[in-house]
Amino acid sequence: MLWPGVLNRIRQFGPAPSAPLTLEARALGAYLGLAVGDALGATVEFLTPNEIRHQIGLHRHLTGGGWLKLRPGMVTDDTTMSLALGEAILLSGGRVDALLAAQAFDQWMRSKPVDIGNTVRRNLMRFRRTGEPCAPPSEHDAGNGAAMRLLPAALATFGLDADTVRDAVLAQAHVTHHSPLSDAACLTLTGMLHALLAGADKKTVLQQHVQPLIQQYPVFGFRARRCDNPSGYIVDTLQAVFQAFFDTDTLEDCLIDVVNRGGDADTTGAIAGMLAGAHQGPKAIPRRWLSVLDADTRAACELQSWLLLPAVLA
Ligand SMILES: [Mg+2]
């Protein structure tokens, strides 16, 4: 049950465009950005850029449809797994606990979600059999499934010490994805989110978070060629997200850019959306998207974006 007074208060966090954004506004922008990016991208998931051009033109509205036959404004596993993780974190008073996260994801899988990734399904079935929340290390589990749902863990650890952040981010990731590339991506995205939530500009985020990732894992380098039709491999996903995020000026342009590349468009949209939303806040999200976004999803994102911040949890 949602508390309308709280929601109204959260909705007022977006200040005038010229005023500095508050932490709460950036957190709200990140969560709503994740959801609208997911809903926008789901329509064109698994299409190529050419197929999108021929079937739709430039895809820029929350029309639903796609291979999942969604209603306009419906989200997919990226957002619903995030909300499941957020609930688990709130239940444990702000701690990211691997067992609670695994149980929350298992419950989520039992709710018959509209879609579920292969690695997520396989390792949640393993959790059901073994009760062990940490998947065994596997270089093959380098999909984007842990990165797409990390926002609640990033919000709940904002401002906390580096070890706590790392433990929390990897605890939720390893329930289903235990690979060095997924780990590096999750830690980098969390660092980027924390910097953006604190008001850092894109250039600083690129220098302090993305370039060190590329130094350690050159495969994430994203300047050699345009990444179209990105797969669910975390390297492809982040290359497309980085190109769209760093080469556009607004959240709207960033999300339209990234989803029109097709491929795993709901997840590139979700990840780009959380970054751009943390950077620009909720007012940067086009009204035509927010008004169509599923109302229950929107309310849950709004509530969690606020409740998960450590200052509120304390
Ligand atoms: Mg999805």
Image: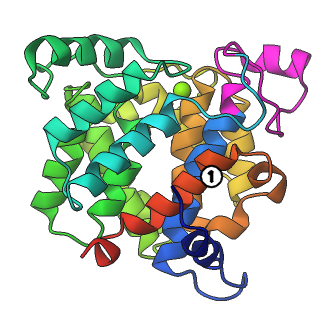
Q: Residue at x 23, y 32 (%)?
A: 103
Q: How far across and down, in percent of the image, does residue 12 sit?
A: 65, 79
Q: Residues within 10 Å of mark 1 (few under 14, many from 20)?
A: some
Q: How far across and down, in percent of the image, does residue 177 sit?
A: 25, 25
Query: Of helix, strand and loop, which one carries label 1?
Result: helix
Q: Quadrant of residue 240?
A: top right
Reply above or below: 126 against 171.
above
| Residue 75 in magenta stretch | no
Name the one closer to the observer, 241 or 291.
291
Side of 187 where 264 appears, left or right: right
| Residue 67 in magenta stretch | yes
- Residue of label 1: 298
Q: Residue at x 55, y 41 (%)?
A: 270
Total numbered circles:
1
Give the extent of the magenta segment: 41-68
Q: How far across and down, in percent of the image, does residue 7 sit?
A: 59, 69
Q: How far across and down, in percent of the image, does residue 83 sit?
A: 44, 44
Image quadrant occupied by the C terminus: bottom left
The three-letter amino acid code for the residue at tag 1 is: Arg
